Image (cartoon, grey):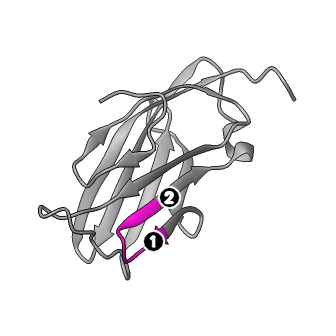
């Protein structure tokens, strides 16, 4: 699944490309975790993190709960990921970055989403 406007991702791992993200724009999307019966998974007491890296593996940005990732409805299994406008300003235009989003529940780690982010030059300051 490749998209330019991912807003909801279920517990199933998703390959999501964010194509043509303009420098200085906010990148925001929601992830809803549900079990096999489509019941929400309670996120209380769990962690999540997302890393954006250059193709050579150099870390560009790390998000954690409370710093870019919010459990917007923990009992309802919903988290919101937001890369701030000030963070996307520093992305190099015409460069494609790699990212993944992981959720940790105790010793269990699940990759919820991964893909690429391609930045383009901002025109309006």
Q: Residue at x 67, y 39 (%)?
A: 88
Disc 1 crowd, CA 10 A, few/some/many (<14, 14-19, 20+): some
**x, y percentage for residue 63?**
53, 57
Q: Assess whether mark 2 and mark 1 are in contact (beta carbons under 8 angstroms).
A: no
Q: Residue at x 72, y 44 (%)?
A: 85
Residue under circle 2?
Answer: 80
Q: Quadrant of the N terminus?
A: top left
Q: Residue at x 39, y 71 (%)?
A: 47
Quarter assignment of residue 24 = top right
Residue 78 belongs to magenta span: yes
Q: Secondary structure at mark 2?
A: strand
Residue under circle 1?
Answer: 73
**x, y percentage for residue 98?**
43, 34
Residue 57 belongs to magenta span: no
Q: Secondary structure at mark 1?
A: strand
**x, y percentage for residue 56?**
45, 31
Q: Nearer the viewer, mark 1 or mark 2?
A: 1
**x, y percentage for residue 125?**
87, 29
The residue segment tinted magenta is 72-79
Which label is found at residue 89?
Answer: none
Give the farthest residue toward the top: 94
Q: Earlier in the sequence, mark 1 or mark 2?
A: 1
Left or right of 17, for residue 121: right
Residue nearest the viewer, comparing 6 with 115: 6
Q: Residue at x 69, y 37 (%)?
A: 25
Give the farthest residue toward the left: 36
């Amino acid at each position: 699944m490749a998209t330019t406007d991912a807003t909801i991702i279920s517990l199933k791992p998703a390959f999501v490309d964010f194509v043509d993200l303009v420098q200085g724009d906010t990148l925001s999307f929601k992830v809803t975790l549900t079990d096999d019966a489509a019941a929400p998974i309670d996120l209380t007491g769990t962690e999540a993190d997302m890393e954006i890296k250059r193709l050579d593996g150099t870390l560009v940005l790390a998000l954690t709960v409370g710093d870019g990732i919010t459990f917007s409805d923990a009992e309802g299994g919903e988290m919101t990921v937001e890369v701030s406008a000030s963070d996307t300003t520093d992305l190099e235009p015409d460069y494609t970055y790699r990212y993944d989003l992981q959720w940790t529940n105790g010793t269990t780690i699940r990759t919820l989403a991964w893909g690429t982010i391609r930045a383009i030059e901002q025109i309006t300051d």
